[in-house]
Amino acid sequence: MDVLVRVDAGLGADDEETAALVARLREELVAVELDPVAAPAETPPGAKGLGAGELGSMLVVLAASGGVLTTLVGTVQAWLLRHADSRIVLEVAGDRLELTGATDSERRRALDNWLARHDAGRAEKHGGDTAS
């Protein structure tokens, strides 16, 4: 599963600030054994407004094993708590989830719904076993 991760550093942020925030998020993803790559050379089908190598974007390719999408989301959510002026957009097959300064309960509800849609899709592909 490919997850496009886009970081918006907030109003007034320049390219240098955006690049620094993306580098910090990338380090945190690598620390939990997720290995993001630069934005894809071609925009995935259904993706809106993202081009080759767009500043602030990275692609995370997840294995089909259970829990890796949850790990990605948890890491992004923790990062966002430390960078409250930023915004993160996660996108899987055109399904976008925007994380901003919403309350914890609002953010958790949106995350749970988004994760359920993609975990259910993976379960169907693997005969109901998301741990394969």
Image (cartoon, rainbow, N blue to C red):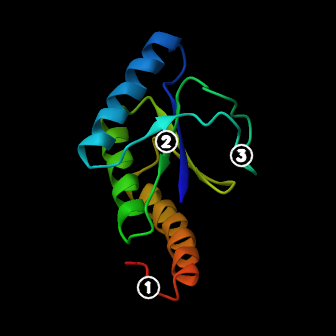
What is the number of the mark on residue 100?
Answer: 2
Question: Which of the image's four quarters has the C terminus?
Answer: bottom left
From the viewer's side, name the closer residue of 58 and 91. 58
Q: Alpha-carbon distance for marks 3 and 2?
A: 19 Å
- State the image quarter where residue 67 is shown: bottom left
Looking at the rendered structure, the kind of residue marked 3 is Ala
Amino acid type at image mark 1 = Asp
Q: Please state the horizontal and vertical placement of residue 124, each as a whole percent of the image.
A: 57, 83
Where 100 sits versus 22, above or below?
Answer: below
In the rendered structure, the answer to whether residue 111 lies left or right of residue 81 reads right
Q: Residue furthest left?
A: 31
Q: Earlier in the sequence, mark 1 or mark 3?
A: 3
| Category of crowding for the residue at label 2, using alpha-carbon neighbours closer than 10 angstroms: few (below 14), some (14–19), many (at least 20) | some
Residue topped by disc 1 = 129
Q: Amino acid at mark 2?
A: Thr
| Element class at badge 1 | loop
Label 3 close to label 2 by CB (< 8 Å): no
Q: Secondary structure at mark 2?
A: loop
C-alpha separation, residue under disc 1 versus residue under disc 3: 28 Å
Residue 114 position by quadrant: bottom right
